[in-house]
Image (cartoon, rainbow, N blue to C red):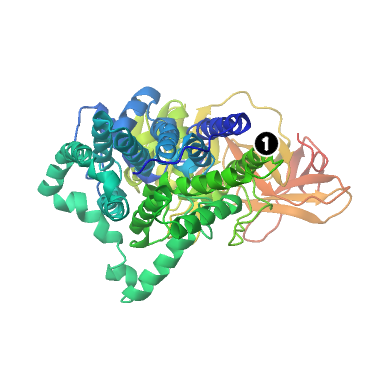
């Protein structure tokens, strides 16, 4: 690359502000480590399982599982899993390391392609870029490609400018290692060839005396690539097979309309920078473009400047070449724009707004009486941009500055249940609850076989008993935990729960596959503990069932109720419970729940003799203003809807229903 212009240097305000923004980006990559976004998707878990295999002695150069994966990220993850264990942090710490190291690499790239101010701008923009923040927090290998891309291009520019052979060798090694990171690296030879062609056409004299340096870099790159190339030659179907599965020329994807599919994909790819980004929840806050509106203007300004001054702005020209070529992996594949496949454009893409802002700042500083205002304005712009990332990714988006496309996702990405589905958070909950269980653990083997996240996160091996569908289990002594698939006949499974114990019924969260239309409950957990002394009943019904405890917590728009039932001799006929929330002094029902006491997952016909049943219930409710409420609880015959008589009551009651007071709306109890 020809020598970069160096006359624009950052003042103290700009330097301090940019360093503060870079530090803020570091914090964004480290807060809530492993917990946001919550869950562990199967691709992350498979990486973790391969990392465990490395710790156990396996050392492949290419990992064949899950359509084949390059080795660098998995070997790095082996170190983090070894340090943090088989946890989400163990998996995602590898991404955080790559993301953090990419920040100084982006500075090197900007510094060598521009000047010190461009370096700081590049690092600061990348630090606050939601796309890269997210990649730094999830266990996908895509985050490792920008690191090696930045090192290769930054060291290469420095080596050519300073005529430093060692830097060129380092650039070649970094470039060769980029092929060990992620599939889109295979497009980089085309980008480098076009960049070299640009140099030969417009800057031949500058390159003429640097041919030897290019050879040194090329030889180092080839030597670094050689081991992986040997694997590709020996096993081409494993190393090269994934590309054909997702390419738009695959008829199962283009459905016989390749030109139309290619055009739509190209338009969506062009739009990802400023208009509309990836809509897959695992890769992005859905629909958010790469650049927010403020940086989008700077990016578009850099594009215009690079095209208009193609020859005199080599850094911009080369950046546009790289970004165009490294956009092809998403343009030529399904689901464009796809922020994992497009990861190769990072961090070169942030050079474009950085160079544009540097040029704007240089011009504004020549305005009489401008003083430090241009620098302050620059820091304010980047601070707002980083603030939008914090709001959209860590907080709740309810309004504010929209994208150029009118990006209108409103909600909390951090807690949105749809985001949870995409990261299989329910399977993560299952594994964590299994690890925390006491006594014998009975686990339906389909969870371990079907969910890599359960396989990776489940570290408990003592007293673990796997069982298959329909297998009848023998009663066991408490304490024990049973975790079962609830969408089948549960009778054979529930036979493991002992009589005379305290049985807790804990429905797990809902889940949904990417292509499944409706969510469903993934699992139910039952716990059995030794029964303590029984308290006096709040009410005893004619069929012998007693309500011996009720705990109520009111918070916001939800009522959390935990009922405790007891039956010395469980009934032989089905029975249903009603729970009504009514306004004080009236009969208006504000909310209600109808299900068997003990829930549908442990109805009275399944109870053992002398068992105590803990029955949690969540009641969504909209509270009326200025009105107190109360809770009515009773039992009825599902065949006739006739209420069962209360034969004993230890609290207020009416019409065979127990009355429990509730705190005032908005309070907690």
**What residue is drawn where x is 73% and y is 51%?**
621
Apparent side of residue 115 relative to residue 253 in the rendered image (left or right): right
Q: Quadrant of the N terminus?
A: top left
* Number of marks: 1
Q: x, y percentage for residue 151?
A: 34, 36
Q: Is residue 447 visible?
A: no
**521, 543: nearer the viewer:** 521
Apparent side of residue 121 relative to residue 237 in the rendered image (left or right): right
Badge 1 density bin: few <14, some 14–19, many ≥20, Cα 10 Å:
some
Q: x, y percentage for residue 486?
A: 46, 49
The residue labelled by disc 1 is 372
Quadrant assignment, res 428: top left
Please say if 656 is above or below 642: above
Q: x, y percentage for residue 416?
A: 58, 48
Quadrant assignment, res 155: top left
**What residue is drawn where x is 53% and y is 33%?**
22
**439, 39: nearer the viewer:** 39
Quadrant assignment, res 104: top left
Mark 1: secondary structure: loop
Q: x, y percentage for residue 623?
A: 79, 50
Apparent side of residue 307 relative to residue 465 in the rendered image (left or right): right
Q: Quadrant of the C terminus?
A: top right
**79, 464: nearer the viewer:** 79
**What residue is drawn where x is 59% and y is 46%?**
363
């Amino acid at each position: 690359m020809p020598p970069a212009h160096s006359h624009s240097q950052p003042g103290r305000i700009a330097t301090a502000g940019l360093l503060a923004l870079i530090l803020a980006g570091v914090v964004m990559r480290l807060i809530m480590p492993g917990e946001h976004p919550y869950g562990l998707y199967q691709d992350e878990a498979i990486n973790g399982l391969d990392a465990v295999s490395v710790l156990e002695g396996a050392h492949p150069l290419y990992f064949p599982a899950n359509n084949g994966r390059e080795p660098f990220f998995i070997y790095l993850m082996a170190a983090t899993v070894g340090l943090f264990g088989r946890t989400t942090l163990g998996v995602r710490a590898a991404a955080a390391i790559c993301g953090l190291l990419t920040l100084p690499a982006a500075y090197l790239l900007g510094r060598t392609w521009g000047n010190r101010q461009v370096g700081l701008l590049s690092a600061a923009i990348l630090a606050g870029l939601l796309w890269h923040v997210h990649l730094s927090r999830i266990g996908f290998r895509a985050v490792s490609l920008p690191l090696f891309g930045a090192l290769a291009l930054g060291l290469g520019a420095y080596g050519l400018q300073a005529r430093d052979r060692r830097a060129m060798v380092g650039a070649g090694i970094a470039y060769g290692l980029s092929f060990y990171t992620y599939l889109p690296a295979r497009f980089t030879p085309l980008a480098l060839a076009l960049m070299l062609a640009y140099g030969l056409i417009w800057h031949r004299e500058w390159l003429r005396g640097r041919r030897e340096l290019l050879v040194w870099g090329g030889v180092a790159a080839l030597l670094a690539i050689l081991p992986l190339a040997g694997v590709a030659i020996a096993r081409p179907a494993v190393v090269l097979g994934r590309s054909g599965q997702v390419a738009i020329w695959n008829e199962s994807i283009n459905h016989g309309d390749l030109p139309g599919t290619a055009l739509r994909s190209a338009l969506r790819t062009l739009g990802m920078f400023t208009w509309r980004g990836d809509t897959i929840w695992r890769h992005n806050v859905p629909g958010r473009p790469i650049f927010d509106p403020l940086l989008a203007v700077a990016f578009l300004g850099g594009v215009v400047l690079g095209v208009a001054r193609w020859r005199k702005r080599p850094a911009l020209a080369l950046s546009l070449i790289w970004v165009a070529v490294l956009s092809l992996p998403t343009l030529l594949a399904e689901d464009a724009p796809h922020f994992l496949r497009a990861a190769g454009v990072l961090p070169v893409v942030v050079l474009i707004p950085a160079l544009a802002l540097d040029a704007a700042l240089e011009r504004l500083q020549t305005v009489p009486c401008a003083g430090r205002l241009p620098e302050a304005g620059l820091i304010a712009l980047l601070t707002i941009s980083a603030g939008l990332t914090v709001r959209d990714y860590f907080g709740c988006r309810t309004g504010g500055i929209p994208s150029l496309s009118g990006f209108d996702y409103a909600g909390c990405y951090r807690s949105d249940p749809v985001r949870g589905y995409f990261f299989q958070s329910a399977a993560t909950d299952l594994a964590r609850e299994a690890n925390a269980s006491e006594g014998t653990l009975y686990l339906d083997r389909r969870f371990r076989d079907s969910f890599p996240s359960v396989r990776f996160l489940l570290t408990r091996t003592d007293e673990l008993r796997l069982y298959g569908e329909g297998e009848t289990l023998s009663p066991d002594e408490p304490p024990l935990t049973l975790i079962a698939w609830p969408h089948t006949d549960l009778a054979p499974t529930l036979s493991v729960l002992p009589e005379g114990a305290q049985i807790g019924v804990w429905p797990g969260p809902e889940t949904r596959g990417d292509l499944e239309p409706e969510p469903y409950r993934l699992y139910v957990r039952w716990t059995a503990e030794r029964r303590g002394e029984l308290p006096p009943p709040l009410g005893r019904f004619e069929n012998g069932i007693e309500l011996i405890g009720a705990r109520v917590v009111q918070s916001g728009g939800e009522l959390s109720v935990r009922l405790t039932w007891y039956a010395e001799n469980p009934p032989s006929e089905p029975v249903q419970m009603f729970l009504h929330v009514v306004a004080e002094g009236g009969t208006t029902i504000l909310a209600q729940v109808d299900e068997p006491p003990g829930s549908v997952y442990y109805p009275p016909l399944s109870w053992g003799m002398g068992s105590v049943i803990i029955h949690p219930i969540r009641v969504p409710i909209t509270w009326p203003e200025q009105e107190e409420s109360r809770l009515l609880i009773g039992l009825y015959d599902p065949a006739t809807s006739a209420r069962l008589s209360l034969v004993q009551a230890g609290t207020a009651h009416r019409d065979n229903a127990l009355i429990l007071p509730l705190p005032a709306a908005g309070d907690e109890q």
